[in-house]
Image (tube, rainbow, N blue to C red):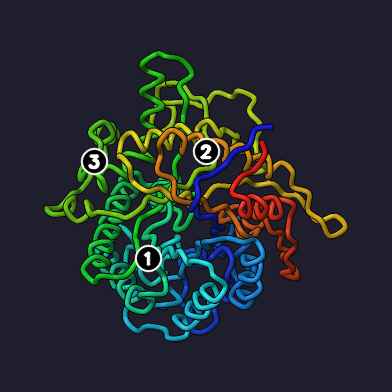
Amino acid sequence: MAIIEFPKGMKWGAATASYQIEGAVHEDGRGLSIWDTFSHTPGKIINGDNGDVACDSYHRYEEDIDLLKELGVDVYRFSVAWPRIFPNGTGEVSQKGLEYYHRVVDKLIENGIEPMCTLYHWDLPQALQDKGGWANRETISAFVHYAETMFKEFNGKIKYWITLNEPWCISFLSNYIGAHAPGFQDLQLATDISHHLLIAHGKTVKKFIEMEIEGKIGFAPNTTWLEPYSNKQEDIDACHREIGHYVEWFMDPVFKGEYPRFLLDWFEKKGVTLHIQDGDLEEIHQPIDFLGINFYNGYIARYKENEGLFDFEYVEMGYERTDIDWPIFPEGFYKVLTYIHHRYGNVPIYITENGACYNDEPSNGRVRDDKRIKYLQQHLTALSRAIESGVNIKGYCVWSLLDNFEWAEGYSKRFGIIHVDYHTSERTKKDSFYWYKKLIANNWFEM
Protein backbone atom coordinates (compact mmCIF):
# COMPACT_ATOMS: atom_id res chain seq x y z
CA MET A 1 0.00 0.00 0.00
CA ALA A 2 1.25 3.45 -0.90
CA ILE A 3 0.28 6.42 1.25
CA ILE A 4 -0.85 9.37 -0.89
CA GLU A 5 -0.46 12.48 1.25
CA PHE A 6 -1.41 16.06 0.45
CA PRO A 7 0.15 19.36 1.51
CA LYS A 8 -0.95 20.99 4.73
CA GLY A 9 -3.52 23.65 3.96
CA MET A 10 -5.01 21.80 0.99
CA LYS A 11 -8.67 22.86 0.70
CA TRP A 12 -11.16 20.05 0.17
CA GLY A 13 -14.61 20.66 -1.20
CA ALA A 14 -17.63 19.54 -3.16
CA ALA A 15 -19.37 21.20 -6.10
CA THR A 16 -22.89 21.66 -7.49
CA ALA A 17 -24.66 23.97 -9.97
CA SER A 18 -27.91 25.89 -9.58
CA TYR A 19 -30.05 24.46 -12.37
CA GLN A 20 -28.88 20.93 -11.61
CA ILE A 21 -29.99 20.93 -7.97
CA GLU A 22 -32.27 23.83 -7.00
CA GLY A 23 -35.63 23.15 -8.64
CA ALA A 24 -38.27 25.75 -7.64
CA VAL A 25 -38.01 27.22 -11.11
CA HIS A 26 -41.19 29.28 -10.79
CA GLU A 27 -40.78 30.41 -7.17
CA ASP A 28 -39.95 33.81 -5.69
CA GLY A 29 -39.94 35.61 -9.00
CA ARG A 30 -37.28 33.56 -10.76
CA GLY A 31 -37.24 34.16 -14.50
CA LEU A 32 -36.87 31.51 -17.15
CA SER A 33 -33.42 30.35 -18.24
CA ILE A 34 -32.33 28.81 -21.51
CA TRP A 35 -32.24 25.47 -19.73
CA ASP A 36 -35.91 25.75 -18.77
CA THR A 37 -36.70 26.28 -22.44
CA PHE A 38 -34.31 23.61 -23.72
CA SER A 39 -35.36 20.94 -21.23
CA HIS A 40 -39.02 21.46 -22.09
CA THR A 41 -38.33 21.11 -25.81
CA PRO A 42 -39.28 17.57 -26.92
CA GLY A 43 -36.35 15.37 -27.87
CA LYS A 44 -33.61 17.43 -26.22
CA ILE A 45 -33.28 15.61 -22.87
CA ILE A 46 -33.22 11.87 -22.22
CA ASN A 47 -36.62 10.65 -20.98
CA GLY A 48 -38.03 14.16 -21.41
CA ASP A 49 -36.57 15.14 -18.02
CA ASN A 50 -36.27 18.74 -16.82
CA GLY A 51 -34.92 20.71 -13.87
CA ASP A 52 -38.27 21.88 -12.50
CA VAL A 53 -37.69 20.01 -9.22
CA ALA A 54 -34.18 18.53 -9.59
CA CYS A 55 -32.88 17.81 -6.06
CA ASP A 56 -35.24 20.39 -4.53
CA SER A 57 -32.21 22.07 -2.94
CA TYR A 58 -34.00 25.41 -3.00
CA HIS A 59 -36.07 24.04 -0.12
CA ARG A 60 -33.52 21.56 1.24
CA TYR A 61 -30.36 23.68 1.28
CA GLU A 62 -30.10 23.44 5.08
CA GLU A 63 -30.13 19.64 4.91
CA ASP A 64 -27.49 19.74 2.17
CA ILE A 65 -25.25 22.07 4.15
CA ASP A 66 -25.61 19.78 7.17
CA LEU A 67 -24.34 16.98 4.93
CA LEU A 68 -21.40 19.18 3.84
CA LYS A 69 -20.64 19.82 7.50
CA GLU A 70 -20.68 16.08 8.23
CA LEU A 71 -18.42 15.50 5.22
CA GLY A 72 -15.94 17.95 6.71
CA VAL A 73 -15.30 20.08 3.61
CA ASP A 74 -13.43 23.38 3.73
CA VAL A 75 -15.13 24.74 0.59
CA TYR A 76 -18.50 24.45 -1.10
CA ARG A 77 -18.57 25.43 -4.75
CA PHE A 78 -22.08 26.38 -5.84
CA SER A 79 -23.51 28.60 -8.57
CA VAL A 80 -26.01 31.41 -8.58
CA ALA A 81 -28.94 31.27 -11.00
CA TRP A 82 -28.72 34.55 -12.91
CA PRO A 83 -32.53 34.58 -13.52
CA ARG A 84 -33.11 34.41 -9.75
CA ILE A 85 -31.27 37.74 -9.40
CA PHE A 86 -32.41 39.40 -12.64
CA PRO A 87 -35.51 37.57 -13.92
CA ASN A 88 -35.17 39.42 -17.25
CA GLY A 89 -31.37 39.35 -17.33
CA THR A 90 -31.22 43.09 -16.64
CA GLY A 91 -33.46 45.69 -15.06
CA GLU A 92 -35.13 45.09 -11.72
CA VAL A 93 -33.30 43.04 -9.10
CA SER A 94 -35.19 40.25 -7.32
CA GLN A 95 -34.74 40.78 -3.60
CA LYS A 96 -36.15 37.31 -2.90
CA GLY A 97 -33.45 35.84 -5.10
CA LEU A 98 -30.73 37.70 -3.23
CA GLU A 99 -32.26 36.69 0.11
CA TYR A 100 -32.16 33.01 -0.85
CA TYR A 101 -28.43 33.11 -1.57
CA HIS A 102 -27.83 35.10 1.61
CA ARG A 103 -29.48 32.27 3.54
CA VAL A 104 -27.29 29.71 1.78
CA VAL A 105 -24.08 31.69 2.30
CA ASP A 106 -24.87 32.53 5.94
CA LYS A 107 -25.55 28.87 6.71
CA LEU A 108 -22.26 27.86 5.07
CA ILE A 109 -20.31 30.44 7.06
CA GLU A 110 -22.03 29.42 10.30
CA ASN A 111 -20.78 25.89 9.68
CA GLY A 112 -17.21 26.96 8.93
CA ILE A 113 -17.49 26.26 5.18
CA GLU A 114 -15.98 28.71 2.66
CA PRO A 115 -18.46 29.65 -0.09
CA MET A 116 -16.98 29.48 -3.60
CA CYS A 117 -19.47 31.12 -5.93
CA THR A 118 -19.74 30.52 -9.67
CA LEU A 119 -21.54 33.42 -11.31
CA TYR A 120 -22.37 31.61 -14.54
CA HIS A 121 -22.97 27.87 -14.72
CA TRP A 122 -25.00 27.94 -17.94
CA ASP A 123 -28.43 29.24 -16.89
CA LEU A 124 -28.60 32.33 -19.10
CA PRO A 125 -31.87 34.26 -18.68
CA GLN A 126 -34.14 33.38 -21.59
CA ALA A 127 -34.98 37.07 -21.98
CA LEU A 128 -31.36 37.68 -23.01
CA GLN A 129 -31.31 34.67 -25.33
CA ASP A 130 -34.35 36.15 -27.06
CA LYS A 131 -32.11 39.11 -27.95
CA GLY A 132 -29.31 36.89 -29.30
CA GLY A 133 -27.80 35.56 -26.08
CA TRP A 134 -24.03 35.42 -25.90
CA ALA A 135 -23.81 36.24 -29.62
CA ASN A 136 -25.07 39.73 -28.73
CA ARG A 137 -22.42 41.94 -27.12
CA GLU A 138 -25.14 43.53 -24.97
CA THR A 139 -25.15 40.29 -22.97
CA ILE A 140 -21.57 41.07 -21.93
CA SER A 141 -22.73 44.31 -20.30
CA ALA A 142 -25.69 42.54 -18.69
CA PHE A 143 -23.36 39.93 -17.20
CA VAL A 144 -20.97 42.52 -15.79
CA HIS A 145 -23.89 44.37 -14.21
CA TYR A 146 -25.17 41.11 -12.69
CA ALA A 147 -21.67 40.34 -11.36
CA GLU A 148 -21.31 43.86 -9.93
CA THR A 149 -24.64 43.41 -8.13
CA MET A 150 -23.43 40.16 -6.59
CA PHE A 151 -20.06 41.65 -5.61
CA LYS A 152 -21.75 44.55 -3.78
CA GLU A 153 -24.28 42.31 -2.10
CA PHE A 154 -21.86 39.62 -0.88
CA ASN A 155 -18.60 41.54 -0.38
CA GLY A 156 -16.92 40.16 2.74
CA LYS A 157 -19.12 37.04 2.78
CA ILE A 158 -18.07 35.31 -0.45
CA LYS A 159 -14.30 35.45 -0.91
CA TYR A 160 -13.88 33.05 -3.84
CA TRP A 161 -15.55 33.98 -7.12
CA ILE A 162 -15.61 32.12 -10.44
CA THR A 163 -16.83 34.09 -13.45
CA LEU A 164 -17.60 31.28 -15.92
CA ASN A 165 -17.86 27.52 -15.72
CA GLU A 166 -16.58 25.62 -18.77
CA PRO A 167 -16.63 28.27 -21.50
CA TRP A 168 -15.94 25.54 -24.08
CA CYS A 169 -19.28 23.96 -23.20
CA ILE A 170 -21.11 27.31 -23.21
CA SER A 171 -19.81 28.08 -26.68
CA PHE A 172 -18.89 25.01 -28.73
CA LEU A 173 -20.86 22.20 -27.07
CA SER A 174 -23.98 24.36 -26.94
CA ASN A 175 -23.75 26.33 -30.19
CA TYR A 176 -21.68 24.15 -32.56
CA ILE A 177 -22.31 20.56 -31.47
CA GLY A 178 -25.74 21.60 -30.23
CA ALA A 179 -26.00 19.09 -27.38
CA HIS A 180 -26.74 21.72 -24.72
CA ALA A 181 -28.91 24.81 -24.50
CA PRO A 182 -29.63 26.74 -26.65
CA GLY A 183 -28.80 23.90 -29.06
CA PHE A 184 -27.49 25.61 -32.20
CA GLN A 185 -25.06 24.04 -34.70
CA ASP A 186 -23.05 26.90 -36.17
CA LEU A 187 -19.25 27.02 -35.90
CA GLN A 188 -18.99 30.75 -36.59
CA LEU A 189 -21.65 31.44 -33.94
CA ALA A 190 -19.88 29.25 -31.39
CA THR A 191 -16.53 30.91 -32.08
CA ASP A 192 -18.03 34.40 -31.72
CA ILE A 193 -19.63 33.35 -28.43
CA SER A 194 -16.36 31.96 -27.10
CA HIS A 195 -14.79 35.40 -27.64
CA HIS A 196 -17.71 37.27 -26.06
CA LEU A 197 -17.52 34.98 -23.01
CA LEU A 198 -13.87 35.84 -22.51
CA ILE A 199 -14.61 39.55 -22.79
CA ALA A 200 -17.36 39.14 -20.19
CA HIS A 201 -14.90 37.32 -17.95
CA GLY A 202 -12.22 39.99 -18.36
CA LYS A 203 -14.57 42.92 -17.80
CA THR A 204 -15.91 41.21 -14.68
CA VAL A 205 -12.42 40.68 -13.27
CA LYS A 206 -11.63 44.33 -14.04
CA LYS A 207 -14.80 45.42 -12.20
CA PHE A 208 -13.89 43.18 -9.23
CA ILE A 209 -10.49 44.86 -8.99
CA GLU A 210 -11.90 48.38 -9.42
CA MET A 211 -14.46 47.78 -6.67
CA GLU A 212 -11.69 46.51 -4.36
CA ILE A 213 -13.77 43.47 -3.49
CA GLU A 214 -12.37 41.37 -0.66
CA GLY A 215 -11.30 37.96 -1.93
CA LYS A 216 -10.08 36.19 -5.05
CA ILE A 217 -11.46 35.72 -8.55
CA GLY A 218 -10.81 33.30 -11.42
CA PHE A 219 -12.60 31.14 -13.99
CA ALA A 220 -13.07 27.40 -14.50
CA PRO A 221 -12.38 25.95 -17.96
CA ASN A 222 -12.92 22.28 -18.62
CA THR A 223 -9.93 20.35 -19.91
CA THR A 224 -9.10 17.05 -21.54
CA TRP A 225 -5.95 15.24 -22.63
CA LEU A 226 -5.31 13.37 -25.87
CA GLU A 227 -2.22 11.20 -25.93
CA PRO A 228 -0.89 10.72 -29.48
CA TYR A 229 -1.21 7.17 -30.78
CA SER A 230 2.31 7.39 -32.21
CA ASN A 231 5.21 9.81 -32.39
CA LYS A 232 4.21 10.81 -35.93
CA GLN A 233 3.97 14.59 -36.20
CA GLU A 234 0.49 14.35 -37.71
CA ASP A 235 -0.74 12.45 -34.62
CA ILE A 236 0.96 14.91 -32.26
CA ASP A 237 -0.49 17.90 -34.10
CA ALA A 238 -3.99 16.43 -34.19
CA CYS A 239 -3.97 15.85 -30.44
CA HIS A 240 -2.55 19.33 -29.83
CA ARG A 241 -5.40 20.91 -31.77
CA GLU A 242 -8.04 19.23 -29.63
CA ILE A 243 -6.24 19.89 -26.32
CA GLY A 244 -5.66 23.46 -27.44
CA HIS A 245 -9.34 23.97 -28.14
CA TYR A 246 -9.93 23.55 -24.40
CA VAL A 247 -6.67 24.94 -23.00
CA GLU A 248 -4.93 27.50 -25.23
CA TRP A 249 -8.09 28.86 -26.85
CA PHE A 250 -9.55 29.93 -23.50
CA MET A 251 -6.39 30.42 -21.42
CA ASP A 252 -3.97 32.16 -23.82
CA PRO A 253 -6.15 35.29 -24.11
CA VAL A 254 -6.46 35.48 -20.32
CA PHE A 255 -2.80 34.84 -19.47
CA LYS A 256 -1.03 36.06 -22.61
CA GLY A 257 -3.44 38.55 -24.19
CA GLU A 258 -3.60 36.71 -27.50
CA TYR A 259 -5.27 33.76 -29.21
CA PRO A 260 -3.13 30.78 -30.26
CA ARG A 261 -2.02 31.27 -33.86
CA PHE A 262 -2.26 27.59 -34.77
CA LEU A 263 -5.96 27.53 -33.90
CA LEU A 264 -6.75 30.86 -35.55
CA ASP A 265 -5.19 29.48 -38.73
CA TRP A 266 -7.14 26.23 -38.41
CA PHE A 267 -10.45 28.03 -37.96
CA GLU A 268 -9.71 30.21 -40.96
CA LYS A 269 -9.26 27.02 -43.02
CA LYS A 270 -12.77 26.08 -41.88
CA GLY A 271 -14.13 29.42 -43.06
CA VAL A 272 -14.39 30.92 -39.57
CA THR A 273 -13.06 34.36 -38.70
CA LEU A 274 -12.72 35.58 -35.13
CA HIS A 275 -14.24 39.05 -34.85
CA ILE A 276 -11.92 40.90 -32.50
CA GLN A 277 -12.66 44.58 -31.91
CA ASP A 278 -10.15 47.16 -30.73
CA GLY A 279 -9.52 46.74 -27.02
CA ASP A 280 -11.05 43.25 -26.73
CA LEU A 281 -7.81 41.45 -25.96
CA GLU A 282 -6.80 44.09 -23.42
CA GLU A 283 -10.15 43.61 -21.68
CA ILE A 284 -9.69 39.84 -21.56
CA HIS A 285 -6.07 40.01 -20.38
CA GLN A 286 -6.76 40.81 -16.72
CA PRO A 287 -4.83 39.34 -13.77
CA ILE A 288 -6.71 36.51 -12.07
CA ASP A 289 -6.04 35.12 -8.61
CA PHE A 290 -6.56 31.47 -9.40
CA LEU A 291 -7.50 29.08 -12.18
CA GLY A 292 -10.27 26.52 -11.78
CA ILE A 293 -9.76 23.27 -13.66
CA ASN A 294 -12.45 20.70 -14.47
CA PHE A 295 -11.28 17.28 -15.65
CA TYR A 296 -13.13 14.00 -16.25
CA ASN A 297 -11.53 11.98 -19.04
CA GLY A 298 -8.94 11.65 -21.79
CA TYR A 299 -8.17 9.52 -24.81
CA ILE A 300 -5.59 8.01 -27.11
CA ALA A 301 -6.06 9.63 -30.52
CA ARG A 302 -4.50 9.87 -33.97
CA TYR A 303 -4.76 11.94 -37.11
CA LYS A 304 -7.60 11.18 -39.49
CA GLU A 305 -8.23 13.50 -42.39
CA ASN A 306 -11.63 15.22 -42.41
CA GLU A 307 -12.70 13.56 -39.17
CA GLY A 308 -14.57 16.09 -37.05
CA LEU A 309 -13.45 19.66 -36.54
CA PHE A 310 -9.77 18.90 -35.92
CA ASP A 311 -8.99 15.87 -38.13
CA PHE A 312 -8.48 13.20 -35.47
CA GLU A 313 -10.09 10.02 -34.25
CA TYR A 314 -10.15 8.33 -30.87
CA VAL A 315 -8.51 4.92 -30.71
CA GLU A 316 -10.26 2.42 -28.48
CA MET A 317 -7.63 1.01 -26.12
CA GLY A 318 -9.89 -1.00 -23.85
CA TYR A 319 -9.78 1.44 -20.96
CA GLU A 320 -12.48 1.03 -18.33
CA ARG A 321 -15.36 3.45 -18.76
CA THR A 322 -17.77 5.09 -16.36
CA ASP A 323 -21.54 4.73 -16.75
CA ILE A 324 -21.64 7.82 -18.99
CA ASP A 325 -19.22 5.94 -21.28
CA TRP A 326 -16.23 8.21 -20.65
CA PRO A 327 -12.85 6.43 -20.61
CA ILE A 328 -10.95 6.53 -17.33
CA PHE A 329 -7.60 8.15 -18.02
CA PRO A 330 -6.02 9.55 -14.82
CA GLU A 331 -2.65 9.89 -16.56
CA GLY A 332 -4.30 12.61 -18.63
CA PHE A 333 -5.15 14.53 -15.45
CA TYR A 334 -1.48 14.62 -14.48
CA LYS A 335 -0.41 15.54 -18.00
CA VAL A 336 -2.86 18.38 -18.54
CA LEU A 337 -2.03 19.91 -15.15
CA THR A 338 1.71 19.82 -15.78
CA TYR A 339 1.12 21.15 -19.31
CA ILE A 340 -0.85 24.13 -17.94
CA HIS A 341 1.80 24.76 -15.29
CA HIS A 342 4.56 24.70 -17.90
CA ARG A 343 2.65 27.03 -20.24
CA TYR A 344 1.28 29.59 -17.79
CA GLY A 345 3.61 29.46 -14.82
CA ASN A 346 2.90 29.14 -11.13
CA VAL A 347 -0.77 30.16 -11.22
CA PRO A 348 -2.69 28.82 -8.18
CA ILE A 349 -5.06 26.06 -9.31
CA TYR A 350 -8.22 24.72 -7.73
CA ILE A 351 -9.68 21.54 -9.14
CA THR A 352 -13.23 22.81 -9.39
CA GLU A 353 -14.70 19.57 -10.77
CA ASN A 354 -13.56 15.96 -10.94
CA GLY A 355 -15.68 12.89 -10.47
CA ALA A 356 -17.33 9.86 -12.02
CA CYS A 357 -20.74 8.68 -13.17
CA TYR A 358 -21.86 5.37 -11.67
CA ASN A 359 -25.54 4.55 -11.35
CA ASP A 360 -25.41 2.48 -8.15
CA GLU A 361 -28.69 2.31 -6.26
CA PRO A 362 -29.29 1.85 -2.52
CA SER A 363 -29.51 -1.67 -1.15
CA ASN A 364 -30.61 -2.01 2.48
CA GLY A 365 -29.92 1.69 2.97
CA ARG A 366 -26.37 1.55 1.60
CA VAL A 367 -24.92 2.58 -1.76
CA ARG A 368 -21.81 0.56 -2.54
CA ASP A 369 -20.06 2.64 -5.20
CA ASP A 370 -16.62 1.04 -5.13
CA LYS A 371 -15.92 2.03 -8.74
CA ARG A 372 -16.35 5.72 -7.89
CA ILE A 373 -13.95 5.34 -4.97
CA LYS A 374 -11.41 3.70 -7.27
CA TYR A 375 -11.83 6.54 -9.82
CA LEU A 376 -11.24 9.14 -7.10
CA GLN A 377 -8.20 7.24 -5.80
CA GLN A 378 -6.69 7.12 -9.28
CA HIS A 379 -7.29 10.79 -10.02
CA LEU A 380 -6.18 12.02 -6.61
CA THR A 381 -2.99 10.03 -7.05
CA ALA A 382 -2.49 11.80 -10.38
CA LEU A 383 -3.17 15.09 -8.58
CA SER A 384 -0.56 14.22 -5.97
CA ARG A 385 1.94 13.52 -8.76
CA ALA A 386 1.21 16.95 -10.22
CA ILE A 387 1.76 18.60 -6.82
CA GLU A 388 5.04 16.73 -6.36
CA SER A 389 6.01 17.92 -9.86
CA GLY A 390 5.59 21.55 -8.84
CA VAL A 391 2.03 22.34 -9.94
CA ASN A 392 0.53 24.91 -7.55
CA ILE A 393 -2.60 23.03 -6.49
CA LYS A 394 -4.53 24.78 -3.71
CA GLY A 395 -7.67 22.69 -3.48
CA TYR A 396 -9.95 19.99 -4.89
CA CYS A 397 -13.74 19.87 -5.27
CA VAL A 398 -15.38 16.55 -6.04
CA TRP A 399 -18.18 16.54 -8.59
CA SER A 400 -20.70 16.21 -7.26
CA LEU A 401 -22.12 16.50 -3.79
CA LEU A 402 -25.48 15.20 -5.03
CA ASP A 403 -26.85 13.11 -7.83
CA ASN A 404 -28.60 15.71 -9.94
CA PHE A 405 -30.06 16.82 -13.28
CA GLU A 406 -27.21 15.86 -15.62
CA TRP A 407 -28.06 18.28 -18.42
CA ALA A 408 -28.92 16.49 -21.69
CA GLU A 409 -28.69 13.15 -19.85
CA GLY A 410 -31.51 14.16 -17.52
CA TYR A 411 -31.70 12.01 -14.40
CA SER A 412 -30.20 8.96 -16.11
CA LYS A 413 -26.62 9.60 -14.93
CA ARG A 414 -25.47 9.85 -11.32
CA PHE A 415 -22.28 11.70 -10.32
CA GLY A 416 -23.01 12.33 -6.65
CA ILE A 417 -21.33 11.05 -3.52
CA ILE A 418 -24.85 11.36 -2.09
CA HIS A 419 -27.68 9.42 -3.73
CA VAL A 420 -30.90 11.33 -4.42
CA ASP A 421 -34.24 9.60 -4.84
CA TYR A 422 -35.85 11.79 -7.50
CA HIS A 423 -39.38 10.82 -6.40
CA THR A 424 -38.97 11.69 -2.71
CA SER A 425 -35.77 13.83 -2.72
CA GLU A 426 -34.41 11.55 0.02
CA ARG A 427 -30.62 11.76 0.39
CA THR A 428 -28.52 8.63 1.06
CA LYS A 429 -24.79 8.92 1.70
CA LYS A 430 -22.81 6.59 -0.56
CA ASP A 431 -19.69 4.64 0.42
CA SER A 432 -17.71 7.27 -1.53
CA PHE A 433 -19.05 9.94 0.86
CA TYR A 434 -17.50 8.11 3.81
CA TRP A 435 -14.27 7.45 1.90
CA TYR A 436 -13.95 11.13 0.99
CA LYS A 437 -14.81 12.17 4.54
CA LYS A 438 -11.93 10.07 5.84
CA LEU A 439 -9.54 11.54 3.26
CA ILE A 440 -10.51 15.08 4.25
CA ALA A 441 -10.03 14.31 7.95
CA ASN A 442 -6.60 12.72 7.42
CA ASN A 443 -5.33 14.65 4.37
CA TRP A 444 -4.09 11.32 2.99
CA PHE A 445 -5.35 7.94 1.79
CA GLU A 446 -3.97 4.50 1.05
CA MET A 447 -3.72 3.52 -2.59
Distance from Cα at disc 2 to Cα at disc 3: 31 Å
Q: Are marks 1 and 3 in contact (CB under 8 Å)?
A: no
Look at label 2 and name its amino acid. Answer: Ser
Comparing 184 with 319, the one in front is: 319
For the point 46% across and 70% down, which residue is it? 81
Circle number at residue 384: 2
- Is label 2 in a helix, a strand or a loop? helix
> In the figure, residue 389 lies in which quadrant?
top left
How many numbered marks appear?
3
> In the figure, residue 328 lies in which quadrant?
top right
Q: Decide if residue 203 is on the left or right side of residue 46.
A: left
Which residue, as the protein is rendered here, is positioned at the far right? 364
Residue 309 appears in the picture as rendered: no
Q: Residues within 10 Å of mark 1 (few under 14, many from 20)?
A: some
Residue 159 appears in the picture as rendered: yes
Comparing 330 with 57, the one in front is: 330
For the point 69% across and 55% down, which residue is it? 433
Which residue, as the protein is rendered here, is positioned at the far left? 278
Circle number at residue 225: none
236 relative to 389, above or below: above
* Residue 439, percent from left and from top: 63, 50
- Is label 3 in a helix, a strand or a loop? loop
Look at label 1 and name its amino acid. Answer: Gln
Look at label 3 and name its amino acid. Answer: Tyr
Q: Which residue is mark 1?
A: 129
* Residue 177, percent from left and from top: 45, 45
> From the image, which quarter does the N terminus lie in?
top right
Q: Residues within 10 Å of mark 2 (few under 14, many from 20)?
A: some
Comparing 396 with 33, the one in front is: 396
> In the figure, residue 208 lies in which quadrant?
bottom left
Q: Which residue is mark 3?
A: 259
> From the image, which quarter does the C terminus lie in?
top right
